[in-house]
Amino acid sequence: MKTITSLFFALLLPFAPALQAQTAAKDQSPEDMVRQITTDVLDAIKQDKGLQTGDKQKALALAEQKVLPHLDFTEMTRLAAGRTWNTATADQKERLVASFRAMLVRTYANAIDVYRGQTMMVEPARVPTAATEATVRNRYVSPGRRPTPVDYAMRKTNGEWKIYDIVVDGISLVLTYRAQFEESARASGVEGLIKQLQEKTQPPVLGKGA
């Protein structure tokens, strides 16, 4: 669980299928939204053999159509970039967000089959009506293993709750990336960081004999 892939997949798992849930998101509490969509996505994975076997095209389509609207990629990128974000121009920030988004979607596609056979228990959350920040705490349960705590950091933007960080077993997604991003930016600047992120989404180059 303590890998970038596991962190990101845990982030996306509860927010995949169920278009009707996306429509009703503005009327739901963070806890209710997580509980409803979690049930839908786990059922979908159980029923879709392509997703079970790691079909990357299906996973990419799933992410683009159902998952990404629930994520605040600008805030995720700002937090992951740390001090680098403050030195970037408006254009560079836009490209950082786009590159980080593309890399995370690719990671999701490669991890779609990780959570087969798991269930998730959403713990009760007390979120005041006027609140704009919330943490929804969950536990992933897998046969023969101890439950894994998963916390979703959420923020209300334009009347809708969105995720901007995930903490799995005490490890933050955005903070895990921050060390890598700041190291890359120190070595080659913001443009170098953007290039590195873009390279991570490129398909491997096959040799002539391939």
Image (cartoon, rainbow, N blue to C red):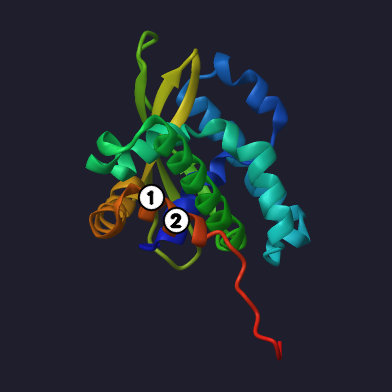
Please name the residue shown 33% across and 48% down the image: 190
Residue 70 visible in the picture: yes
Q: Are the residues tagged 1 and 2 within 8 Å (C-beta)?
A: yes
Decide if residue 175 is on the left or right side of residue 36: left
Q: Amino acid at mark 2?
A: Lys
Q: Nearer the viewer, residue 61 or 11?
A: 61
Please name the residue shown 40% across and 24% down the image: 155
Which residue position holds label 1?
191
Give coordinates of residue 142: x percent, y percent. Answer: 49, 60
The alpha-carbon separation of the residues under discs 1 and 2 comes to: 6 Å
Please name the residue shown 76% across and 61% down the image: 50
Q: Nearer the viewer, residue 72 or 152?
A: 72
Decide if residue 210 is on the left or right side of residue 184: right
Residue 169 visible in the picture: no
Q: Quadrant of residue 145?
A: bottom left
Give coordinates of residue 60: x percent, y percent. Answer: 67, 51
Q: Quadrant of residue 138?
A: top left
Q: Secondary structure at mark 1?
A: helix
- Position of 145 relative to 193 (above/below): below
Quadrant of the drawing holding the C terminus: bottom right
How crowded pointer 2 is (Cα within 10 Å; few <14, some 14-19, many 20+) is rated as some
Give coordinates of residue 195: x percent, y percent. Answer: 44, 56
Give the number of the disc on residue 195. Answer: 2
Quadrant of the drawing holding the N terminus: bottom left
Number of marks in the rendered image = 2
Give the number of the disc on residue 38. Answer: none
Q: Secondary structure at mark 2?
A: helix
